[in-house]
């Protein structure tokens, strides 16, 4: 198995500030019955310019909470989140988000769904129409511009959601289990397609997933989180050269690294949550 030379993994030169910084971040939620739930506890993380970082962990470990704090959708209870040295106070135009469900408006055609952020923000649609067409082609949906969401498969709808997230050309893309609802074969195809799209302009990507193989296939690094309250258990640098083909999933080296990550979950397995490591396929 060929390993990636230094040039294959986009890391910022030593000494430069990270693009995204989480500094001793914690987040506590209040339940309806008045109990406090600590979702994320004292977590620090740096993400570099142009890096594809996968975050993997069991359900309820705070992965989505981390992503929502980076997106500015919720604030940390303590600690700080910075993007390019500026504290995150709310949603930013240079940060795009793709959720697990496509959330397309069913009465709008593909082109209008892609342009929706432009319309909502009161920008001139004419200035973004050409970019929307280019994005639709880039995600493999050329010819479907006039289709309604109900005429598209689940994988195609997620492609529209990705194009919509990219319409304002954000430098940072946050993806919250975007392929979790897809069947295995479509998910594998979308993994390959996302790698191709990312390679086109090397945006900084934070990708949340339950799947260890998916995290390894896509990421430059894999951040492994513990069960709730979520903390970083281990950071794994992925050694495989890009571009990565689906044959990588069947390699012995890939399987060994996936097993190592499963071992991290076993080491942190909680007595009151037996077997959660086996949930991560």
Image (cartoon, helix red, strand yellow):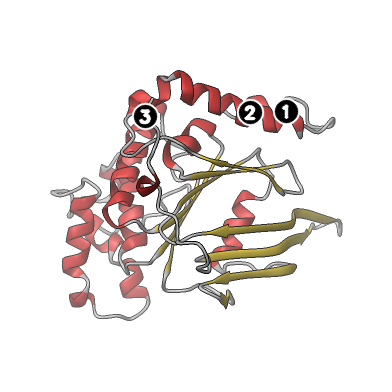
Residues 10 and 34: in front is: 10
Residue hosting label 2 = 262
Where does residue 2 sit, x and y in percent of width and height?
36, 29
Q: Do the residues labelled 1 and 2 touch (CB within 8 Å)?
A: yes
Q: What element carries label 3?
A: loop
Give the Cα separation between the discs numbered 1 and 2.
6 Å
Q: How far apart are marks 3 and 2 (CA)?
A: 23 Å
With 192 as the anchor, is 138 left or right in this view? left
Q: Write down the residue under mark 3.
A: 2
* Farthest left residue in view: 143
Decide which of tag 3 and tag 2 comes sooner along the chain. 3
Which quarter of the rendering shows the N terminus? Answer: top left
Label tally: 3
Quadrant in which the C terminus appears: top right
Mark 3–mark 2 contact, CB under 8 Å?
no
- Point out the frontmost of discs 3 and 2: 3
The image shows residue 205 at horizontal and vertical percentages of 44, 55
Q: Of the two numbered discs 1 and 3 on the same chain, state the one appearing first in sequence.
A: 3
Helix, strand or loop at mark 1: helix
């Amino acid at each position: 198995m060929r390993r990636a030379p230094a040039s294959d993994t986009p890391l910022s030169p030593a000494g430069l500030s990270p693009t995204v910084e989480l500094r001793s971040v914690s987040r506590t939620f209040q339940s309806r019955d008045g109990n406090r739930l600590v979702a994320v506890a004292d977590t620090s993380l740096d993400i570099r310019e142009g890096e594809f970082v996968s975050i993997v962990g069991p359900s309820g470990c705070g992965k989505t909470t981390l992503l929502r704090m980076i997106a500015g959708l919720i604030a940390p209870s303590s600690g700080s989140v910075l993007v390019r040295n500026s504290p995150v106070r709310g949603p930013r135009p240079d940060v795009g988000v793709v959720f697990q469900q496509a959330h397309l408006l069913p009465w709008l055609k593909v082109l209008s769904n892609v342009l929706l952020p432009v319309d909502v923000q009161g920008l001139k649609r004419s200035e973004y129409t050409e970019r929307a067409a280019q994005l639709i082609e880039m995600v493999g949906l050329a010819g479907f511009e006039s289709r309604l969401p109900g005429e598209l498969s689940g994988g195609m709808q997620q492609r529209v959601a990705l194009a919509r997230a990219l319409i304002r050309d954000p430098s940072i893309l946050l993806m919250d289990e975007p392929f979790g609802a897809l069947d295995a074969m479509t998910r594998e195809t979308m993994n390959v397609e996302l790698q191709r799209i990312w390679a086109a302009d090397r945006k900084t990507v934070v990708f949340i997933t339950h799947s260890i193989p998916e995290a390894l296939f896509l990421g430059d690094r894999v951040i492994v989180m513990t069960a709730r309250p979520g903390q970083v258990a281990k950071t794994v640098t992925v050694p495989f050269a890009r571009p990565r083909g689906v044959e990588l999933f069947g390699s012995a080296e890939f399987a060994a690294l996936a097993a190592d990550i499963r071992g991290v979950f076993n080491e942190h397995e909680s007595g009151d949550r037996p077997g959660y490591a086996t949930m991560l396929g």
